[in-house]
Image (cartoon, coloured by chain):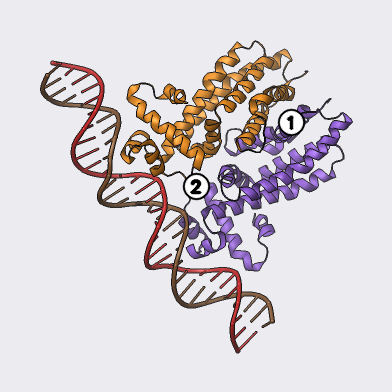
Chain colours: A orange, B purple, C brown, D red
Amino acid sequence: MESVFERVEPGARKANKRHILNCALACFDELGLEATTVDTIRQRSNSSIGTIYHHFGNKEGLVAAIYLAALDDQQALITPAMELADDPKGAIAALIKTYMDWVSQQPRLARFMFQARSLVASSHFKGELDARNKQRYGSLLNYLAEGVKKGEIRSLPRETYASLLIGQSENYCRAWLGGRVKGTPAEHAEIFAEAAWRSVACSP
Amino acid sequence: MESVFERVEPGARKANKRHILNCALACFDELGLEATTVDTIRQRSNSSIGTIYHHFGNKEGLVAAIYLAALDDQQALITPAMELADDPKGAIAALIKTYMDWVSQQPRLARFMFQARSLVASSHFKGELDARNKQRYGSLLNYLAEGVKKGEIRSLPRETYASLLIGQSENYCRAWLGGRVKGTPAEHAEIFAEAAWRSVACSP
DNA sequence: ATTAGTTCTAGAATATTATTCTAGAATCAT
DNA sequence: ATGATTCTAGAATAATATTCTAGAACTAAT
């Protein structure tokens, strides 16, 4: 978990910044976004108000820093996994399995992402978020377009593909993190990969 | 939109309470949950702090009241639509089309629901939310179980069905409300109903 | 190694916002 | 008509976020 923030804030100099990020994540996860105050985080991290505001600007900035680091960590696993695949079906399976494995292994981060998403999306970090999402799905969509030409993928409105592919597994992950279902996302990943493929494929 | 709150707070006596709910919804939608203060709502509704706290207890209670009213409004359309269907495929299509139509017609309420969900889920209204969701999916799951016996529906882990059916359309609705896609949910509803069916059906 | 510049730490002071409290007005049931 | 209940109002208080100032630690260039 230390490693998640090492990617965005590397080096010994940033050790305390990473420490604060970790403590903040723990607080948010245990108490919820609203209920954790900046002072709660200060106490847990043995830090000071000044330090926290120096590094993150405000509470929203701290939330966004964790959120974007988590998104980057996810993407750092998904991109290479999809590049290894050699057909659309394999790429879709890689996307879904990698995503569901990540959630299963990083439940605190994943839970935080669901809680913080709408906050980040309505903050002035919206731009950064949109840029990452655009990059995230851009290459996938071009890839699918080829599949359509070859007759492997159904021709559907371009804007529906992302939801058709990731919506089901995302919904299940949220349910698991909220304790409403028991089986880990990882253990059902095949089912969801298969369902996503059925949704967009011309033939099984 | 007045009618949404009439269901839960009927009668002339509750007119002001409904008025506050409507004004609060408008504020939340325009400014976001965090950015709208209780005083913002007081101003917009020409009300008073005392009145607001009398009716809702606290800000969280106000959010939950809107959320649960919206959920009930949705359900009031979905339940009869599904009961009219006479086979699993029709029931699934009714569920998805009714849901997507509702979102298209009530974008403010729908957007609010996505923004407030995790807040309500981590509040002490979690119980009420769980009860409604249990009821919401309970009958659907029993219905699907029959389909499995008849060989129409694939036999999958029970806890995966709800995500498989509603995940895609929910994801698209969120994207539409966030301005990331252009086509209304209603206009793509057939595609999503079809995809959900493909995900769980034995044969097309 | 010294020094100028930069980043980091600290916490008191301030500003913003949520919530409580008390009292009176309106409504209802008998 | 009257006692009980619900509703309205806003000042007072409490909780929380944010700003500000000053000094410590570190970095790079001489």
Residue A6: image x %, image y %?
Answer: 42, 23
Mark 2, secondary structure of its residue? helix
Instruction: Tell whether A185 sits left or right of A68.
Output: right
Return the residue found at the far right: B150
| Location of residue B75 with respect to A1 vertically, above or below | below
Indicate which disc residue A66 carries. Answer: none
Which chain contains the residue that carries disc 2?
B
Please state, as top left, top right, bottom left or bottom right, where the C terminus of chain B lies in the image. Answer: top right
Q: x, y percentage for residue A63? A: 45, 36
- Neighbour class for label 2 at 10 Å: few (<14), some, many (≥20)? some
What residue is shown with label 1? B191
Kindly identify the residue that appears in the image at 58 percent across and 15 percent down. A81
* Label 1 and label 2 in one chain: yes
Q: Is residue B62 above or below residue B168?
A: below
Q: In which chain is the residue bearing label 1?
A: B
Secondary structure type for disc 1: helix
Which quadrant would residue B91 be assigned to in this image? top right
Residue A182 at x, y percent in the picture: 67, 33
Taking C7 as reference, is A146 left or right? right
Image quadrant assignment for residue A21? top left
Mark 2 is on which residue type? Leu
Q: Quadrant of residue B83?
A: top right
Question: For this rendering, which residue is in front, A143 or D3?
Answer: D3
Whether residue A159 is visible here, answered yes or no, is no
